[in-house]
Image (tube, helix red, strand yellow):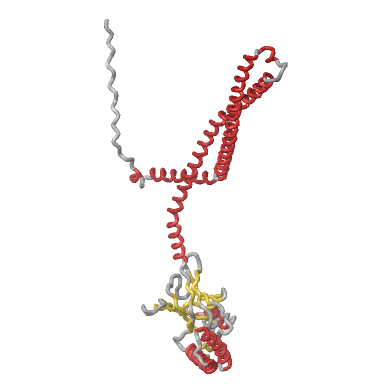
Amino acid sequence: MALQDLTPQLRTRLGRVERLVGVFVTVATLLVVGGFGYYIWHSAKKKGWFDPKVVYSTGINNAAGLFTGSKVKLMGKDVGEITRIVPNDPYDPVGLTVFFTVRDSDNPYFGYIWTDSKVKVVSGDLLGGRVLEVTKGSEYWALPTVQLKAGEELRVLDQAALKARFTEITNGLAQADVAKRGANPDEFRMGVLAQQGRYNLQADVKTNASLFYARQKPGKSFWIDSIESRPIGERLEQIGDTVEAALPSFLALTNQLKSILASAVSATEKLDAMLSDVRPAVTNLAASTTNLAHILANAAVITANLTNGQGSLGEWLVTSNINGQLDRTFGSANVAIGTANDVLATANTNLQTLNRSLESIAGITSNLNVQVQANSNMLSSITRIVNNTDNFILGLQRHWLLRSAFKPIATNAPTKKNPSPSAPIRVRP
C-alpha cells in the first residue's frame, strides 16, 4: 500500500514514530561514540600519553629478556617503558644503548632521579625476563636531572654545560691551591679539590638554575650509567657446570670412604677374634700362677718346720751325717727356691705388661666399635646408594633401547658334552 493511500491520521502517527526512531538512533550513536572516546581517553591517561615525559638512556651488553615496551621501575613502581634498543658501533665498549621514558603522573618521580642514580638490569622472573630499575639518588652533592619551572614546564639538566662548569671550578681551585702552597697538588689533593668543586657546582646550579636546565631537545636523552647483572639462565648454567665438575670428585671420595669403612670393619672383626683366642690362655696362666704360689707357700712352711733348732723332729729321726747331707741338700733347695722366686717375680712382671697390653687393645677395640656405631647411618646411606645404582643399571639393561649396549661378553669356555650312555653290563653265565 502506498503512503498516499493512507489516511491523514495514519500518516501523522507514522511520522511521529519515525521521529522517535530517529531520536533513539541519534542518542544511541552519541552514547556509543562518547563511550568509545572515554575508553580511549582513559586508556591514554592510564598509559601516560598525556603525562610529561623525559627520555633517558643507558648502555648494556646483553639485551636478553628486554623488549620495546618493557616496564621501567623506580622504587618498585612502574614509571615508564623502554622505547628503543639500538646497537652501538662495533668498537664501542658498550654493545647496546637502551632508550626509555620516565613520566610524571600522580607522583613527582623526576624528583628521585639525580645525577648519581644508576640503572640496574635485574631479573624480573624465573623464565629469563629482565627489567630496568632506576635507583633513587642519595649523594649529598648530586643534582636532580629534571627541574619543574613555573607553568608546569619541565627543564632537563644540560650535561655539557654542567661538565664545562665543573672543569672550570676545579681548575680555579687547583690554581688557587698552587698559589697558596707553592707546589702542584698531588693525587690525593686533587681528589679533595674535586670534592670541593662538586659542592661549589651544586651551589652554583641552585643559584643560576636557568643556565644549566633547559628544554630537552628532540632526539636527545639524559645518560645514566648502568649496573648490569647476568641473566638467570647463565647463572643456572654456571651452577650446573660447577656441580658437574665436582660430581666425579664426590663419587671418588664416597668410594674411598666405603673402602676405609670396610677395612675398619674387617680389622675390628680380626682383633675381636684374636682377643677371644687370647682370653682363655691368660685365664689358665693366672690359675697356674695362683696354684704355684700356694705350693711354694706350703713348701716354705714345711722347710721352716724342718730347719728348726734343737728338739725338733729332725734331731730325733736324722743322724748327724744324714743331717749334714740334708743341710747341704736343703741349702741347694733353698738356692733353687730363690731362683724359682726370681723366675716367678719375672713372670709376674711379664704378666702385668701383658695385662696392660691387653687393656690397650681392649680400648682400641672399644673406640673402633664406637666409631662404627656412630657411622651406621653413613654406612646405611652408602649401601642404599649402591643398591639404587645397581637397580638403575639393571633397569637400563632391561630397556629395549639400551639392551644392545649390555650384551654378555663372549668367553672361550669349553662347551659341555653330553655324557655317552654307559654300555650295558654283561653277566657271564
Tag count? 0
166, 208: nearer the viewer: 166
Residue occupying the far top of the picture: 429
Determine the residue positioned at 57% across, 85% down.
141
Residue occupying the far front of the picture: 320
Q: Is residue 176 left or right of residue 334?
A: left
Where residue 242 sits: x, y (%)?
A: 45, 60
Which quarter shows the C terminus? top left
242, 153: nearer the viewer: 242
Where residue 282 sits: x, y (%)?
A: 57, 30
Q: Is residue 18 visible?
A: no
71 is higher (above) or lower (below) than 416 = below
Q: Quadrant of residue 324?
A: top right
Q: Quadrant of residue 335?
A: top right
Where residue 322 sits: x, y (%)?
A: 62, 14
Q: Is residue 407 left or right of residue 305?
A: left
Q: Quadrant of residue 318?
A: top right
302 is higher (above) or lower (below) than 260 = above
Q: Is residue 229 left or right of residue 423?
A: right
Q: Is residue 304 visible?
A: yes
Where residue 144 sits: x, y (%)?
A: 55, 85
347, 206: nearer the viewer: 347
Determine the residue positioned at 52% across, 44% down.
379
